[in-house]
Amino acid sequence: MSAPSTRDTILDAAQRIAAERGAGRITLDEVARESGLSKGGLLYHFASKEALLQAMLERLIARTSAVRANHEQTLAGQPWSVLRAMLATRMNPDVLDPSVAMAILTAVAEQPALLDPLRQHIQQMRERIIAENGDSPAAWLLWAAADGLMFQELLDISPVPADQRDRLHQHLQQLAEDLLK
């Protein structure tokens, strides 16, 4: 296995800081220290904290997209494969790293434009879903339900006990199967 790139080392360090100390503790000085680089070395790769957070978001999108693509492959040829793969990805707690998401949400409060890559990704997903099966209110309700569950879990405000979440996710998947025939 090859060593991670300097860029990944930096992103991993920022992620550790967010997870261990909180999203508000991500500073360029802290990330440089955590990654073992000089601040100049860090600035070579990320000219600002915003650039670092943008890269964290882009990596999160890339990782979730890869998981979704694997789901799509297993669903190839079936109706609503793009949406169903997206739902499965949204409901997989191992896909979304809460520390990264919280770091991004913290930054977005001050700079909403940081979410532009996510907005573009969501629009592309919407266009793919429409191209595959048309525009369906049921599809958008399922997507909204999956996102709602994901954000409740991310923010640790879910009214559903942890031991019942898998059953809830399975029920949402079954609803998707029933509604999207």
Image: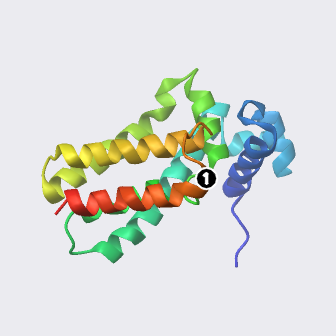
Residue, x 55% and y 58% (percent of image)? 95
Residue 73 can be seen in this image: yes
Residue at image location 34% in from the left, 69% down from the top? 72
Figure label count: 1
Coloring basis for residues:
rainbow
In the picture, measured across the screen, residue 112 lies left or right of residue 31, that is left
Question: Looking at the image, which residue sits at the far bottom?
Answer: 1
Q: Is residue 181 left or right of residue 163?
A: left
Residue found at x 17% / y 51%: 130
Q: Residue flagged by tag 1: what amino acid is it?
A: Ala
Q: Where residue 112 appears, x then y in whole percent?
A: 49, 25
The image shows residue 104, relative to residue 149, as above or below, that is: above
**Local crowd at mark 1 within 10 Å, few (<14), some, or many (≥20)?**
few
Image height of 75 relative to 120, above or below: below
> In the image shown, does 146 or 162 lie closer to the viewer?
162
User: Which of the 4 image quarters holds residue 179?
Assistant: bottom left
Depth order, front residue of 120/6: 120
Q: Helix or strand or loop: what does disc 1 sit on?
A: helix
Task: Residue at 70% x, 43% y: name it.
Answer: 44
Q: Nearer the viewer, residue 149 or 67?
A: 149
Give the x, y percent position of residue 146.
Answer: 40, 48
> What residue did someone put label 1 on?
162
Whether residue 86 is visible here, answered yes or no, is no
In the picture, the quarter occupied by the N terminus is bottom right
In this rendering, the answer to whether 12 lies above or below 77 is above
